[in-house]
Amino acid sequence: MEINQLRTILENLTLEEKIGQLVQLSGEFFSQDKTMIVGPSEKLGIKEEFIPNVGSVLNVIGREKIKKIQSEYLASSRHKIPLLFMGDIIYGYKTVFPIPLGIGATWNPELIEDAYNIISSEAVSEGAHVTFAPMVDLVRDPRWGRSLESTGEDVTLNSVFAKAMVTGLQKNLDEENGLVSCIKHFAGYGAAEGGRDYNTVDMSEREFRQNYLPSFKAGLDAGANMIMTSFNTVNGVPSTGNKWLINDLLRKEWGFEGVTIADYAAVRELIDHGVASDEREATKLAIEATVDIDMKTNCYASQLAPLIEDGGVDLKLVDESVWRVLLLKNKLGLFENPYRGIDNNITIDIDRNFAKAKEVAEQSIVLLQNKNNILPLNSKQKISLIGPYADSKSIMGLWAVYGQEEDCTTIKESIIKRSELKMNYALGTEIIEDVNELGEFGSHSYKGTENTIERQKQLRDQAIKIAKESDVIVLALGEHTLQSGEAGSRTELRLPEVQMKLLDELSKLDKPIVLVLFNGRPLVLTDIVDKVDAVVEAWFPGTEGGNAIVNILFGKTNPSGKLSMSFPFNEGQIPVYYNHYSTGRPKETSNHSGRFVSKYLDAPNEPLYPFGYGLSYSSFKYTNLELSDSQMTKNTHIDLKIEVTNNSDIDGFETIQLYIRDIKGSVVRPVKELKDFKKVFVKAGETVIVNFSIKESQLRFFNQELLWTSENGEFEVMVGTNSKDLLVEKFVLSS
Ligand code: GLC
């Protein structure tokens, strides 16, 4: 629609109709099923007669429902402005990819851009318009259940994936194609104190700008059209009412002109935060911060009109928000085709999409341990496949709202498809001791059989029996889906006790054990790794999880995943992350005596597995790190090359990582920072030369005046296979 026509639509809206465009409700509010005793409207306190004004809908699944709601809505609407359908299509629609923490372990943005374009095409063909993805929060605390949704602890890697996901989702975004990306949660949500979801966040502006904001800027620079506020405080003010964050930084400093939406009920939660005494004050704070859409509360719907009428809020603010929403609907061509995507007959090649999901799952799997090269397995070995995840279809993780478990392939199903493989199966144990402790969330309820002590013993005995008759045990253990994801914070990051009992019993059999892990966060594996031979981190691998895992176990695919988040030695270390500061008493180099340095009495400083860590069936050797010069200025750069040799008879991918340390700055600088990486294929016995260049822009940071700048001085450049095993050279930046 022409802009002037759109402007006319805005001018002809009543105040109630304008406000309606700034309210988002979930699908049940639009259902014609009025038989519900206490309908959702009463529960939310919203007037039934307001519903026809509402402008967008949350999490309606499937084209038929969307078509029905849209057509009924337009039939009764005076203004005929189509509804915008938004949803949590975080890492898959019908084809569900691994959780983003696994996606982060691929270190393959090109692959992930393709994957997110698949997500977009499947979602658009089902009538979706906007996805609340990617979640680009940086997280260093695995107690936080939403580590699941993040690509991890590093600002550079998160920024690379934010760009790839947004680009994949919004490719060719126009009236016919592309899914609008609403990045989230702006901002700093991953730093919740204690790793406890929805908890306070408080940090310096430097830390905020240095580590927690760049991935949002990367997502917006990639063209994300929407952004969602976070539940937490920023500098003492909740994001959803934070004028400095939303209006001053996001809109004025960064120039964002798109739509902002509050997270679920976050406008009203300004009261719980204690910065608003009632819905009226909460509404005023949010609209004046320029939060455009109020998700699932009655605040905007009930308070904006009286606020405008009594001069508490300037109508101009509402008009500007409504205008941004109308522009977005117009960008999607909804005025011409409210059934965008549904009627376009977008052809979905589900086999191709599942194949891509398998490729991503394979590249997300991280080989953490492989004693005596017990992996890869071979078809001559008799496998005992044991554990609650050996034949489970609940392998998509908490935020696979649109995925279907029946589409998932289990490890057992995948092995059975390979007739040459010999395998016996035993459940061994349920996932958790008490089937009811985790409650319900959507389809993720745990309806396991009563897990009595007797039954646990019976299951273990069955497992031990088949294990004794096998050559190697493949043990599939992990967290329950409900133990991670939103509101899934934990203080103990170990496998459930009932699984550890099984592991302990099997480890007494003197049989090689290959442990495959299904989890939504870094776990504490310190008490496990000595009891097993191999550890394969599979995360929640999605629809093709079983096939990807079996390809890795039997060597059809060589593992290439690298951790995007550290695995702690124990919970007491948390937060533990690679790009930490030196401190005045660094354990290894301080002049102080043994005791009086920065260390623990009862644990190492280092994590069990560091950022960037992951093994391969190949064996890669790094040699001849060479710099083109040891000096550079703001106007020159240094070329760097390194040789990587595959000293094995197995071809494989290796991710070469480049870190830089600024030895001295006007503020403390991390002991190392990831600045670049390349994932390269190295054939068996081959040596490849990998080239990088170091530019002054990679040396910048926020100084004491919060200026983004570099400073002259000495630097170290480190290159290697993870954030710990590195070759080092020095260079100087000078004027
Ligand atoms: C949730 C989450 C957010 C999600 C939204 C809509 O509470 O915080 O990530 O997009 O509500 O479901």
Image (spheres, grey):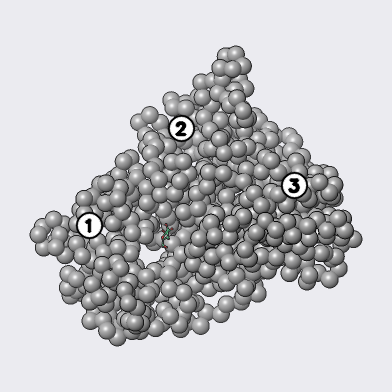
The residue that appears at 29% across and 56% down in the rendered structure is: 267
Can residue 618 be seen in this snapshot? no
SS class, disc 1: helix
User: Picture coordinates of residue 492 (x, y %)?
Assistant: 57, 44
Q: Are marks 1 and 2 in contact (CB under 8 Å)?
A: no
User: Picture coordinates of residue 701 (x, y %)?
Assistant: 45, 35
Q: Quadrant of residue 301?
A: bottom left
User: Picture coordinates of residue 716 (x, y %)?
Assistant: 59, 29
Q: Looking at the image, is 448 positioned above or below residue 105? A: below
From mark 3 to mark 1, how far is it between C-alphas? Answer: 55 Å
What amino acid does circle 1 point to? Glu
Between disc 1 and disc 2, the foreground one is 1
Which of marks 2 and 1 precedes in the sequence?
Answer: 1
What amino acid does circle 2 point to? Ser
What amino acid does circle 3 point to? Asp
Furthest toward the left, the residue is: 310
Q: Is residue 7 left or right of residue 417?
A: left
Q: Is residue 274 left or right of residue 115?
A: left
Mark 3 sits on what residue?
504
The residue that appears at 50% across and 49% down in the rendered structure is: 489
Mark 1 sits on what residue?
279
The residue that appears at 34% across and 78% down in the rendered structure is: 36
Q: Looking at the image, is 191 positioned above or below residue 560? A: above
